[in-house]
Amino acid sequence: MAMNGFRVTRRATLAGGLAFGALASVPLSAQAGAEGARLRALLEQADAADALLDPLSDERRGESSGPAYVDPLGDYYGATLEANKRAQLAALQQIDRKALSPQDAIAYDVFAYRTREVLNLFDSGLFAIKRQLALDPSFGPHVEVADFVSGGGARFESLADYERGLERLAGFGDYLQTAVVRLREGLASGHVQSQVVVGNVLRQVDAMLALAPDDTPFFAAIRRLPDAITASDGERLTAAYRTMITRRILPGYQLWRDFLTQDYAPRALALPGRGAMPDGDRLYAAELARHTTTTLGADEIHALGLSEVARIRGEMEQARKDIGFDGDLAGLFEHIRTDPRYYCKTPEELLARFAAIEAKIWPAIPKLFARRPKAPFRVGPLPALGDQRGTGYYRPGPADGVSPGTLYFNMAMLGTRPIPTLETLTLHEGIPGHHFQITLARENEALPPILRFGSSTAYSEGWGLYAESLGRDLGMFTDPLQWFGHLDMEMLRAVRLVVDTGLHAKNWQRQKAIDYMLANTSMAPKDVAVEIDRYIAMPGQACAYKIGEIRIAVLRERARKALGSRFDIRDYHDQVLGTGALPLAVLEAKIDRWIAGGGGAAGSGF
């Protein structure tokens, strides 16, 4: 990327020592475009600094410019993150936002928002508290690293890749030790996780410890050594990986088991929510703000959820009549839960259904979208510990326009994902949901890193849920059962507003949350329990879906009314997707500017 005669790349920045202060020394009266250049330089340097602290995300982007692993609970991580963000904010404040192009102004606003968000955690003391709650059965490093090295992102093509893999495992071994230190700090300060979270993590730890070293996810790369690795190097690597697993990794999991069983579980909280611990209200408010990118409080979100549940139940009643089901809604839920006709029997059957749905969607895409990702979409099995985890997740490939984005589906849970929901799931996770939203941004090299690779739960999950609402326009939901499945999935997201706030702000017991979800969806009891446990472990995240979707739909209607005959849904979608994941207030300001300008194609804004 060339800027005013100098070149800023990630590796050049790393070699230059990430000198944020140097950016502030450029005179504000420099030539036209200088402010944009200063901002882009800052964003590139900040992205490089973030990559040094989060190597796994860096590698998922197809890069590996720093260490193989950084312990997210270590002192180095926390001190470096805080120092970086304070320097970055100071540099940003020296840039004249009024002199920036519209796209750069958006990048400025997003960067300011995200940087202040991190610094607020340090200033409030919540960063230290969050580290003391270092257990996450959904996306904690103890499961994420296992996924990453066994097929979920790590590159194993060359001898250097395998050497880097050993370095990664050594760093991960350090994390397993540090986590116990942080959890002990939590015991001393009263910041302790719930019995539900501890129990779920212990089951995952037990599942890992039940494996022979060569059967663990950490040995998977050795089982597929490429031809480029010589026989002697292969023997050496095999011995080194086996030693690392037996002496560092599995003993780390054993340490977790011993500590959690003997010291932590007896003091874990009976109530599952944040409200049961010291500082829980402050922590939950920050988590809601982070995920929803709004100032909505728990009571407002709870009330919104109750309203949405009532609305969707009304639509479900009509769908039940259209299906011709004689019983009540509860009976239809139970019918779908228990009738084997509604579930795939094998992974092959599920994959074939996903492929058929995708093929059905693509022909109608040009009606709603002017652009599509170059990279393909695929569905594959969850890499590790499927019997201990949820339904799955979407991950983009490297931003090369070729590597597929993947919905990693938990093939151990075929009996909990009804066939009537698969059209909706494909719309959300794939086309035109996460795969469109994330991959289009990553493939747009004109965007600065914070827009190209950034994340925002309310925006991303809101877009995924909004994409589901486009199903009928894309030829989906012609079968009344598939339409009911769509409503069932929308109901899940409405229920989340109620149960997440119920658990963390209203002292609900886990069973009350489970009962509420079972009463309002057709989800299987096991799947419901997994969902509720995810909300307990990840407070606030589940609220982002509906809040984001509602805002995107409201902005669309605002644009349609204001622009009248000039409104083109393809232009609107370009505007929403064209600058990556945004906090909702930044997205709203962007759409309002577009409306004020008379609408039209996205042009360079995409």
Image (spheres, rainbow, N blue to C red):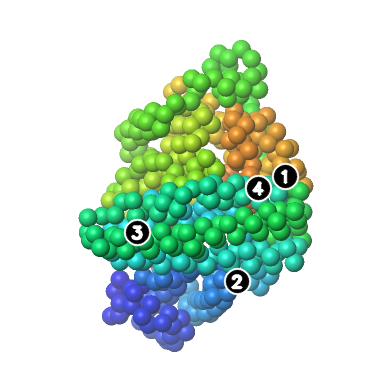
Query: Which residue matches tag 2?
Result: 119
- In three-dimensional space, the C-alpha distance between marks 3 and 4, rounded to whole angstroms, equals 33 Å
Tag 4: amino acid: Gly
Tag 1: amino acid: Gly
Query: Which residue matches tag 3?
Result: 238
Element at label 3: helix
Tag 2: amino acid: Leu
Element at label 1: helix
| x and y, in percent, of residue 145 in the image | 47, 56
Query: Which residue matches tag 1?
Result: 502
Which residue is at 49% across, 79% downward? 91
- In three-dimensional space, the C-alpha distance between marks 3 and 1, rounded to whole angstroms, equals 50 Å
Q: Mark 2 or mark 3, which is nearer the start of the sequence?
A: 2
Tag 3: amino acid: Thr
Query: Which residue matches tag 4?
Result: 199
- In three-dimensional space, the C-alpha distance between marks 1 and 2, rounded to whole angstroms, equals 28 Å
Q: Quadrant of residue 69?
A: bottom left
Instruction: Please tell me how crowded label 1 is: few (under 14), some (14-19), or many (20+) other residues with Cα within 10 Å.
Output: many
Q: Quadrant of residue 230?
A: bottom left
- In three-dimensional space, the C-alpha distance between marks 4 and 1, rounded to whole angstroms, equals 21 Å
| x and y, in percent, of residue 256 in the image | 61, 58
* Quarter of the picture holding the C terminus: bottom left
